Image (cartoon, grey):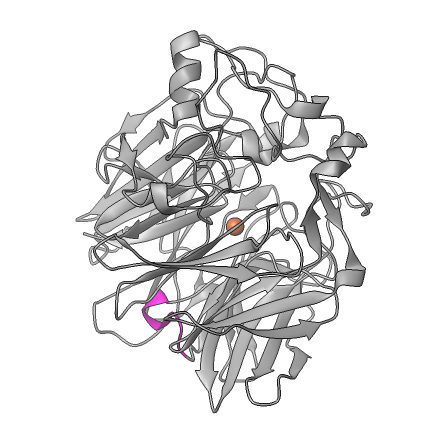
Amino acid sequence: MTVQSLPEHPMLQGPFQPLHVEHELHDLPVVQGEIPRDISGAYYRIGPNLKYRPQQGVYGFHMGDGMAYGLYLENGKAHFKNRWVKTPKLALEDSLGRGAFEWEGGFPDHRNMGWERIQRSSENEGVPAGVANTNIVWQGNQLLAMGEDAVAPLVLDPESLTTTGIVNWSNQLGDGVTPRVNSEDGFFCAHPKIDPVTGEMFGYGFSTQEPYLTYYVVSADGKLALKQDIDAPFPAYVHDMLLTETHVVIPLFPTTFRHERVERQRCIMGWEPDLGTQIAVIPRSGGEVKWFEGDPCYVLHTGIAYAEDNKIVCVSPEFPVAAFPADGLENTWQEFQKAVLTRWTLDLESGGMSKERLDDRSVEFPRMDERLMGRDARYLFDIGSSDASGQIYEGFTSVIRYDLHAGASSAQHELPAGSYLSEAIFVPRRENGPEGEGYLMLNVYHFNEDKTDYVILDAENLSSGPLATIALPHRVPFTPHGNWRNA
Ligand SMILES: [Fe+2]
């Protein structure tokens, strides 16, 4: 395989550096402890892994071709595979042996992440530019690779990780930020929520065109069951949402997409705090939207939500401003603001909203025992820092379990310095066991060795350290998200 030189960018270095080989490794060495024999299934992750140098020699997160990673556990043994997601973009570029896309306006602002109109030519005409690099989700009896914009979710074979197609509801989706070029190019978010009881998947799309937001429900058997346009007050970047047993919550923070910024040689995304935070609460089955207004803030990833006494309660790490570079903000990829665990209470009767800080540590990437998705779950698993100083993407060396039924008290596991930690994924020990009984799966990257270990923790006993450490002979580059599928 020919590897061209990639652009200079902090998100192409260290733990973000692409892996240019597709591996299949059997019976990986367990260098510490033992893999519990009651774990049986697949731990999937996905992340950006740029293959070809973009024509303009620039880079942003949303340009990195998705690569899927599978760690398959059975009878105390671990096997590994990784495969690029064969998006229409990558298929074209593979056929040419080089990058085939460039962005209108010349990609002038280093803070741009890759959302923008594509410069179309006879070469890339009709080919969606999306990369499917953000989340990997099991729903509707399908393994789905999801990005944010410019290509609908792709279907992967759960064993081989090869790309087998695209969801059959792609032609019912609307435009994203990048205008759609064909029926495969509709936009569905990368953070849908799945109800563990009904198997339905709840999601949305956002666009720079009015009405800016669309709400979707996908049935348990993988068909689009509901599409509702939402009149949103501004074209916001919406990365995540929340689900309860009665409603979905789609929060809009004042991070806006405006194509005219690019015409002024600026980043398409900007921070407009005067717009405040506008939170849409929608009945799960669709219908009238209730809007709640709050002060400007930003939630990148949502935690727990539930409905109680005509109120909706949401617990998530909250940033004071956008969690990434944007026009109007001074933060860079190296210097982020900190998110702290915060509870929102939305009163459906009065329309009022209240907030409560639950901790002062810097945390992100919240996950839960998803058998309780949409319900009043007790435990939230975050990664973060042992004090208030750590920053997202750097300096997170702690795995933290919050007990939200005990005043957000917590337990934690601290990794050695020189490690880089991924979002921790909860795996139940047995089908009908109590909430939180099980394991946490995580990727731990070691800077000095440029290698990744897979680490298994006891979710009920984090401070006792790993139950097992499984060594890979290479790195797994940054994977924002992953999910578990029981065998
Ligand atoms: Fe995310």
Magenta stretch, residue numbers: 370-375
Depth check: give the residue in front, 41 or 189.
189
Residue at screen point 60% across, 41% down: 418
Depth check: give the residue in front, 8 or 58.
58
Q: Residue 367, image x and y in percent?
A: 46, 62
Q: Residue 198, image x and y in percent?
A: 25, 68
Q: Residue 120, image x and y in percent?
A: 55, 19
Residue at screen point 74% across, 33% down: 262
Classify 164 as above or below 213. above
Would you say residue 133 is visible in this rendering?
A: yes
Quadrant for residue 466, please give it.
bottom left
* Image-based side of 214 in relation to 353, left or right: left
Q: How many marks?
A: 0
Depth check: give the residue in front, 441 or 302.
302
Q: Is residue 371 magenta?
A: yes
* Image-based side of 225 in relation to 313, left or right: left
Q: Is residue 157 magenta?
A: no
* Image-based side of 166 in relation to 329, left or right: left
* Image-based side of 137 in relation to 341, left or right: left
